[in-house]
Image (cartoon, rainbow, N blue to C red):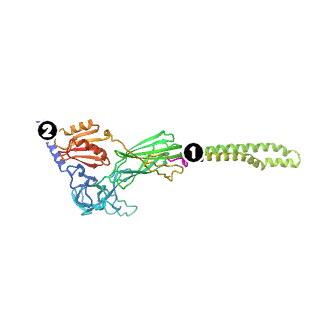
Amino acid sequence: MIRKFAINILKTFGIVILFALTVVPRAFAVQEGDLGAYPSHYDPDNPKTKSWFIYDLKAGQTKEDSITVVNNSDKSLDVKIYPVDATTTSDGAFALLNNDQPQKEIGSWVKLSKDLITIGPKDRKDVPFTISLPSNVTVGDHAGGIIVQEAKKPTIATSGMGLNIVSRVGTRIYETVPGNQIVSLDVRDLSYTIKDNHLVFTFVMENRGNIILTPTGNFQIKDGSGKVFETIPLGNLGAVFPGKPTTITVTSKKDAPSFGQYIATVTVNYSSLKSITKSLTFFLFFHDWSVILPVLLLLLLIILFIIIKKYLSRKHKFQQIAQPEISTNKPQSASFAAKNISGENVDQVFIAHHIKLLGVAVLISVLVLSSLFAFILKDFVFSPIMPHAQGSSTQSTVPSNAPLSKQNTVPTETSIPINKADMKVIILNASGKAGVAKALGQKLSKDGFSVAKIANAEGTSTQTVIQYPIGKNEETDLLMEELKNEYASVTKEASDSAVFTIIIGK
């Protein structure tokens, strides 16, 4: 009896939980504190449209849509809404501009029906908007977003300083204008500095194509003989938007060498078939003065101590020799000479004796510095330019923080074969037929692909879709070749995920 009662209680509790899960707001809403936002309409065949607006409008085309704003607090909120362009941070992360910055793309194409709304507690509102592409818009990827934030009034401080903290929620907008896709990346301005006794390199990646790229990279430092000093894997370098240069900073984990010639080389892979390499040759010469100066100071003190000791010893010796001569009744001239020797002239004699040593030291220093300068002049001014690949350009720049260096920037482009094992693939079954995802996974694994996961998709789809990492166009084409014999129609769509996702449709 008690067992049956407990089972009924558990069933009732399960029904309540299930009902609660069906009425809570969508879990995919972008949320920050009391506010949340997400697209009001989404494509069931593309799960990403639950959180992002993804369009493929043509030049001059217009589309109407709306964004849903959610108030999760227990009070009414005044909410400010505005569209902005997207950019990338210094490490390549996706970011949205501020409202007061110039908007040239998505931020100027989107027109909201309202820019200020009031939402009641635990309520939500749909805000319609229109996105209109210019007739002269460039082919390729464009990114931006819609920001929602609480419209707080400025705090008036009676004393001290007032502080306003505003939280923003951004919903991304991706627009891909159909046309000829251009994949091109340039790496420039490779330079170095020394910070905390570590080499710190910076370089700029500039996307000269029309699609968003997600490159990977590797950094290597060699000495003048070609021996590897350090290899630094860069991994994923983030998203590089067309026309928006990204600066990358690489810090060596090893202590910087004190002396010698070194070559730093960065290799950036921005497509399965394309990469670019830049090299920087530089010279290090006793850069860590915090170590050198105390040593020089110690040597200087030792030299001064030796000279002073010899000076006092010689002066004392002259005084001992001259004193008896002064006490005897010798002629005036001899006593006068002894006085001069034991008096002020002993300093002059000492200086005259050591001026020769000083001259020799100066001469040796000039010879050493001249030899060092000749060595540097020979290897860094009159040396030939480093050999580079045919058809590539060579640039030479000298950063302000490197007073003595030669920098040869050598770009080369090479073809990299596609390694199927590096392509991680997730297969989701949205066809409603059992076993199709497993069968496809076995086929791809046999062909050399790395199948990371096989599962059922949420809901069903009428079309087979490949969601591919941005910039991995060649790998995606290779994957589509594998699927064309299995499925009559396969479409592809860009994603900022690091893996390939195949959604099998009916």
- Please state which of residues 265 and 329 is positioned toward the viewer in this rendering: 265
Instruction: Give the residue at mark 2.
Output: 7
Instruction: Sort mark 1 into few (<14), some (14-19) or many (20+) by Cα contacts within 10 Å.
Output: few
Highlighted magenta segment, given as a residue range: 373-385
- Assign a secondary structure to mark 2: helix
Type of amino acid under label 1: Ile
Q: Nearer the viewer, mark 2 or mark 1?
A: 1
Q: Is residue 487 visible?
A: yes
Residue 414 locus on image (x, y percent): 39, 45
Relative image position of residue 499 (x, y in whole percent): 29, 44
Position of residue 484 measured from the top left corner of the image (x, y, whole percent): 23, 43
266 left or right of 135?
right
9 horizontally vs 411: left or right: left
Q: Which mark is residue 292?
A: 1
Q: Could you say which disc has been placed on residue 428 in the image?
A: none
- Is any part of residue 174 visible from this angle? no
Marks 1 and 2: in contact by CB < 8 Å?
no
Q: Label 1, secondary structure: give it.
A: helix
Query: What's the residue at 39%, 61% (across, down)?
Result: 161
Whether residue 439 sits left or right of residue 227 in the image: it is left
In the rendered view, tell whether residue 213 sits above or below residue 230: below
Tell me the amino acid under the disc marked 2.
Ile
Q: Is residue 154 magenta?
A: no
The quarter holding residue 501 reads top left
Dominant SS in magenta: helix
Instruction: Give how far apart the Cα atoms at labels 2 and 1 are.
Output: 80 Å
**Residue 435's image quarter?**
top left
